[in-house]
Image (cartoon, grey):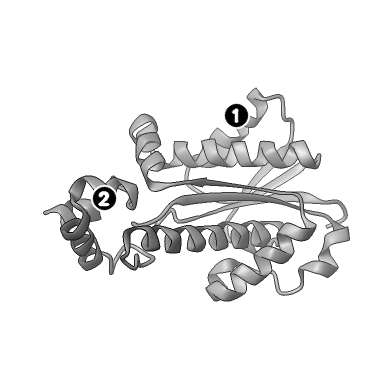
Amino acid sequence: MDEGHIGVDESGKGDFFGPLVIAACYVGPEHLAELEGVRDSKKLSDAMSHRLAVKIKAVCPHSIIAVGPAKYNELYAKFKNLNTLLAWGHARCIENVLELQPANLVISDQFSAGGAAVKRQLYEKGRKVEFRSMVRAEADIAVAAASILARSEFVRRLERLGQEYDIELPKGATNVIPTGKRFVAKHGQDALVNVAKMHFKTSAQVLG
């Protein structure tokens, strides 16, 4: 990598509870020495993600967009499609970083048909960047940095939601039904939209 480029990634997409967080991060050759230990956030503990996120924020131009569950449910009802929602968030995040730091290349993880939609939105805003979606893009340092920023923000916001409602909200989508039922028993089913992604099949099981 001779010149810098932007990486973009998201966290919370497959989690029933908590927000969807999208992050974009510019990494140039001048940042590499500072980014030791930066790798795909899925391979890191939460504590390590938080520590590295602080380091990344201190040196790299970046943008983080967090869509809380209530807003997420509203946007999902409007877009009716997760990829469209992701493309919208990716394009906004990339645009924010380009305002801070011009770049010619953006690398993203491959999410279905989303890449074309991101490209289209960037072109509509007059951004003529090369947009590359790759399988296992987290091997790229800028994508890894973005994945850490997104993961750290997701975990912090999930914990904050849990504190607000006085119930520990688990990550993931498989072990969440008992917690969901406890949440509804405690706060009523109308409050579920404030902590969970309602289009998941899980919500029917929680409310059933």
Locate residue 28, reporting x and y percent.
83, 55
- Identify the mark at residue 192; answer none if there is no mark: 2
Q: Which residue type does callout 1 highlight?
A: Arg
Name the foreground residue: 99 vs 188. 188
Q: Is 194 placed above or below 168 here?
A: above
Judged by depth in the image, the label closer to the viewer, 2 or 1, is 2
Is residue 101 at all visible to an observer of this figure? yes
| Left or right: 187 as drawn, with respect to 139 | left
Q: Earlier in the sequence, mark 2 or mark 1?
A: 1
| Left or right: 193 as drawn, with respect to 11 | left
Circle 2 packing at 10 Å, graded few (<14), some (14-19), many (20+), is many
**At 62% across and 34% down in the image, what residue appears?**
119
Locate residue 13, reporting x and y percent.
43, 53
Image quadrant where residue 54 sits: bottom right
Q: Dot 2 lies on which element? A: helix
**At 21% across and 67% down in the image, what residue appears?**
178
Question: Which part of the image, by quadrant, shows the C terminus?
Answer: bottom left
Name the foreground residue: 168 vs 77. 168
Q: Is 95 placed above or below 34 here?
A: above
| Left or right: 14 as drawn, with respect to 31 | left
Is residue 44 at all visible to an observer of this figure? no
Q: Dot 1 lies on which element? A: helix
**At 32% across and 64% down in the image, what residue appears?**
166
Q: What residue did someone put label 1 on? A: 120
Locate residue 130, reporting x and y percent.
72, 39
